Amino acid sequence: MLCTNRNKRSLTVDTTRPEGQEIVRQLARDADVLIENFKGGGLAAYSLQQHSMRTLNPKLAYCSITGFGQHGPYAARAGYDFLIQGMAGLMSVTGTADGEPGAGPQKVGLALTDIPTGLDAGNAILAALAHRDRDGYRSADGQHIDLALLDVQIACLANQAMNYLVSGTAPIRRCRHAACVSPWRTPTAAAHRRWPTRFICRRRRSNTARRRRHLAKIPRPCGASSLTATPRSPRFGKRG
């Protein structure tokens, strides 16, 4: 409650009653932004949907946040962060890799669908206000922002989704490893005994000056200055 609502002024309104609906309309007449989080089409029964509100206030930036958008077969369904993490594929790439103890999809420890959707909403609202005010607040061109949790979470899959679109191969859970980035792993006791420095300064075959400078700085913050004297290994190719 405090995380998302501190420093806000609150008003409880029963939108199922005519007097409650009129309170919302009165507030919307002088508002810059209206944000609603009902299911798709849920406010139409009360004449509080974006078309009705922007008729009262043409300058209004009306932001609808739903689980699955305003149209389509799932539009009338409720959306929850946990549900969307699974549907969008985030859980399928999170957690212990198959074949290891405890393998299986995992929920992320934060509401990592709700939070990016809120950030996208903030950016979109600012863009809508800038669009409206481009003529010095004389423009009556308000905007309707349609955000769906599922859309945002799929977009957040980033390189995992792009790898699938390019290759046709579904990404998998890798736990301590990354598909295309190095160094990127969680150190384990077994790995430390076998390769004491591998998880810290594993290199790709790159001899760029920038990479050499960055890797040369790793031992100092780790308190392991002796790593600079590690013998060269053919596994890493040439090292300058």
Image (tube, rainbow, N blue to C red):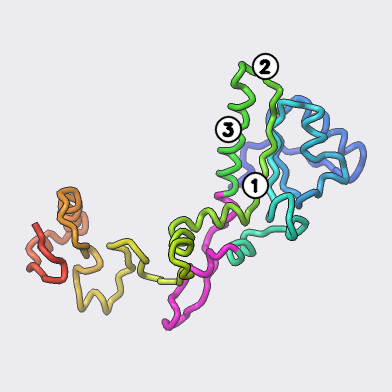
SS label for mark 2: loop
Indicate whether residue 77 is drawn in magenta: no
Would residue 209 be found to the left or right of residue 125 on screen?
A: left
**Residue occupying image coordinates x 58% and y 52%:** 152
**Residue occupying image coordinates x 55% and y 44%:** 119
- Disc 1 or 3, which lies upstream in sequence? 3
Q: Do the residues labelled 1 and 3 touch (CB within 8 Å)?
A: no
Label 2: how many Cα within 10 Å (few below 14, some 14–19, many 20+): few
The image's mark for residue 33 is none
SS label for mark 1: strand
Q: Distance between the residues labelled 2 and 1?
A: 27 Å
Circle 2: residue type: Arg
- Residue for badge 3: 127
Residue 124 location (% of width, % of height) = 59, 38
Tell me the quarter of the picture where residue 179 sits.
bottom left
- Residue for badge 1: 147
Would residue 88 be found to the left or right of residue 214 on screen?
A: right
- Disc 2 or 3, which lies upstream in sequence? 3
Label 3: how many Cα within 10 Å (few below 14, some 14–19, many 20+): some
**Residue occupying image coordinates x 66% and y 59%:** 80
Circle 3: residue type: Ala
SS label for mark 3: helix
Query: Is the stretch drawn in magenta largely helix, strand or loop?
Result: loop
Indicate whether residue 110 is drawn in magenta: yes
The image's mark for residue 138 is 2
Circle 1: residue type: Leu
The magenta-colored residue range is 88-116
- Disc 2 or 1, which lies upstream in sequence? 2
Closer to us: 139 or 9: 139
Would residue 124 be found to the left or right of residue 34 on screen?
A: left
